Amino acid sequence: MKIGLQKNIKASDRLVLLPFRKNMLNSQLIMELSGIKAGYKFEGNFKEYTLLINSTNGRLVFLVGLGEEKQLSRAVEVFRSLFTKEEKYFFGKCVSYLQADQKELAFAIAQAGKMIDHSPRNWDKKFVGKETRKSKPLSMAFITDVNSVKEIAQEGVWTAESQMGIMDLIDRPANFKTPSFLADYVKKSGKRYGYKVKITKGKAIPKKGLHALDSVSKGSEEDAVFIEMEYSPSSRKSSMRSKQPQLGLVGKGITFDTGGISIKGATNMHYMKCDMGGAAAVIGAIELAAKLKLDISVVGIVPSSENCVDGKGTKPGDVIQSYSGKSIEVIDTDAEGRLILADGLAYMEKNYAPDVMLDLATLTGSAVKSLGYSAAALFTENDLLAERIDKVGTEIHERLWRMPMYEEYGSEIKSDVADVKNLGNKPMAGAAIAAKFLEHFTNGHTKWAHLDIAGVAFGDTPTAKYKAGTGYGVRLLVEFMKSIQKENI
């Protein structure tokens, strides 16, 4: 999508956006552009919009409501909603007026504009009906005196591109999205955007000591893969192990989850294609960091597998090994995400020792029961790290809520036959107990946080009839990277 700046409206400009906060309308500007002095109903409420048509020149003027100041972090929702509902108007050039204090709004407008054609059917081009649109692609011009608006808007476009990529990954049916497909996607992305990629798969997985990942994959005909990604400002010239990274990201990459021998019920199992939402967020964030050429070194790890049902699969009660050397009693094979994350975290800590370590996973239904679809669950013992992530999430409306990691939760995963077991004894505090399990494999890392994104990675979107990938986590992680650039934790 092309981005431009201009000083004033042109006679040829046929489509105009006028965004206003609630009860802060510029009536004079509205009249100048639309030729309509009064009689329209518009207050600037959140997601409210009104179309005015200039009877003299046919110009279309959309008045767009941003709501109250506290709702500004949700501006992209405003424009995605508008562009989706009124898609027939948004093609060719669109001009947006920005007031002096609205430069950051350019990000949301451009981000939403780039996503105008996105659909859960985009995973495969032959199924994309919207490709038949005869209209010209949308381009954005901003009327402003602030030169940085173009740069801000361009970042919005790049962010949308990476988000759309991972949304397509999440929405892709599992028969077209194997662990090997995920690995190939990352290799292509790394080559295109300039970050290093290393893939371990198949029989090399247990040889590398990734026994927990191998255990989960035994029930599937598809090979497990272990993906390592490294971005740094000098990635094109560096080796995979050039220096200690500032940030390590681990993402759960279960491309489909039947529950294994502890099989899930059939109701809504088809949604389990989304169980690699954490991996998708990590992949998208590293890709976007490379596009933006951020001055930070980041390593991403994605352990990926299917969790299927087979006679060779791990059984409840089995004891397995892990990369850390700790043994695990598998109480429930449907608690597989924490198993592959255990190997990912231990490998990250031992081989890269990042300053800060985060993992993201669609891990527990417990997190959804606690927080619904409004926020991810955040677990960490580090107050400063929690404060930093929470601040970033609040500013961009990818919210998190800090949950406790009490010592008592750890007692729930003590095992009689192994070092630790993968599920607690009681049907409560499931998300917290999962976090305590993961903590065992961080080797006491003091700047580690676990993000359970089960309720926010997959859900309602403007273009989906049911549930689809939301893109959650990409911008959250990139804005967190920027915060580390400014001030280390």
Image: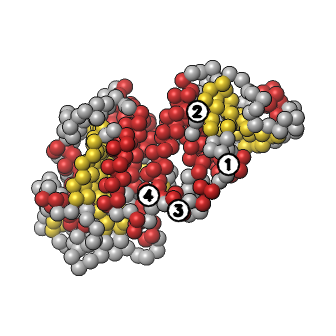
Of mark 1 and mark 2, the one earlier in the sequence is 2
Gap in angstroms between the C-alphas marked 1 and 2: 18 Å
Question: Residue at the location (37% across, 31% down)?
Answer: 294
Query: Which residue has dot 4 on it?
Result: 170
Gap in angstroms between the C-alphas marked 4 and 1: 28 Å
Q: Amino acid at mark 2?
A: Ile
Q: Mark 1 packing: few (<14 Cα in 10 Å), some, or many (20+)?
A: few
Q: Mark 3 packing: few (<14 Cα in 10 Å), some, or many (20+)?
A: few
Q: Mark 4 packing: few (<14 Cα in 10 Å), some, or many (20+)?
A: many
> How far across and down, in percent of the image, does residue 16 sit?
72, 35
Please identify, in this view, whether the residue under mark 2 or under mark 4 is nearer the observer: 2
Gap in angstroms between the C-alphas marked 1 and 3: 19 Å
Task: Tell me the element at label 2.
Answer: strand
Question: Residue at the location (62% across, 26% down)?
Answer: 5
Label drawn at residue 135: 1
Of mark 4 and mark 1, the one earlier in the sequence is 1
Task: Tell me the element at label 1.
Answer: loop
Please identify, in this view, whether the residue under mark 4 or under mark 3 is nearer the observer: 3
Of mark 2 and mark 4, the one earlier in the sequence is 2
Which corner quadrant holds the C terminus? Answer: top left
Please identify, in this view, whether the residue under mark 1 or under mark 2 is nearer the observer: 1
Of mark 2 and mark 3, the one earlier in the sequence is 2
Label drawn at residue 3: 2
Question: Residue at the location (52% across, 62% down)?
Answer: 126
Whether the residues at callouts 1 and 3 have beta carbons within 8 Å, the answer is no
